[in-house]
Image: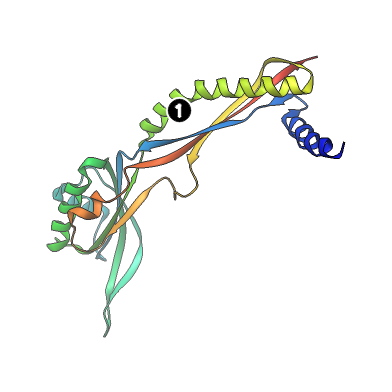
Amino acid sequence: MKPLLLVLIPVLAWVAAAQTPDGISAPVSRTVTLTADEAAFTITIAATVDSTQQQVKQALQSAGLPNPTVVATGLGQATTEWFAGPVQILYSATATIAAGSAMDTAKLLETLRAQLPAPLQSLQYSVAFNPSQATVDAMRQTVLPQMLDDSRNLAQSLAAASGVKLGAIRSIGDSAGVSAGYVNGTFAVSLLGPVTGGILASLPSGTQYTYSLSVIFATVP
């Protein structure tokens, strides 16, 4: 009898864990790879203390960056090995474009950095690749019906093991997030020196997302 008890105890614990005061909980999830079709540029700019956000935005737009969002983030000083320079205003600018245009945009920023117009004094940038919200939402519409079927099948198995019949859905909720091993859903590269084609071409083209569905079914004695 002892080996039989060792088998039954985990099974009973599994059934009990699925039961709630409201019915049977049958959570399911699916992990899919989404195309990283969006490139998010973050640009850090230092400009003279009499500069304005509009001047910085105009400089970026003139360089070819589409509709950047620019905010002042603080004050700083340009320093060298020998002395501290004058106070500067620090700005952060962001722009999101199609991933396929990232290389061209990086070259435009390289050209701007090589010949900074007044009042800009320094410029650095990075780009992160991630799925667009439209891509995330479209996949959600695809996997939700599939997960609901998975959840119902799981709930039916749990109900049978509990000696009850499965009833209607009492509550349902879903979520989506980046799978373990990915940071913030992005692949990022810092472009602080001359741009080469291999920098962007070598980045992964997809991000793994996990969609989760939490369903509670009523039970019928």
Task: Using the image, determine if residue 116 lies above or below residue 13.
Answer: below
The residue under label 1 is: 140
Give the side of residue 196 with respect to residue 80, left or right.
Answer: left
Horizontal and vertical percent position of residue 112 = 15, 57
Horizontal and vertical percent position of residue 216 = 67, 24
Task: Using the image, determine if residue 162 lies above or below residue 105.
Answer: above
Residue visible at 27% across and 57% down? Answer: 125
Give the side of residue 84 with respect to residue 166, left or right.
Answer: left
Q: 133 or 182: nearer the eye?
A: 182
Q: 203 or 124: nearer the eye?
A: 203
Q: 119 or 104: nearer the eye?
A: 104
Q: How is the image coloured?
A: rainbow
Report the number of numbered marks: 1
Horizontal and vertical percent position of residue 19 = 75, 28
Task: Using the image, determine if residue 194 lies above or below residue 132.
Answer: below
Which amino acid type is shown beneath numbered disc 1?
Arg
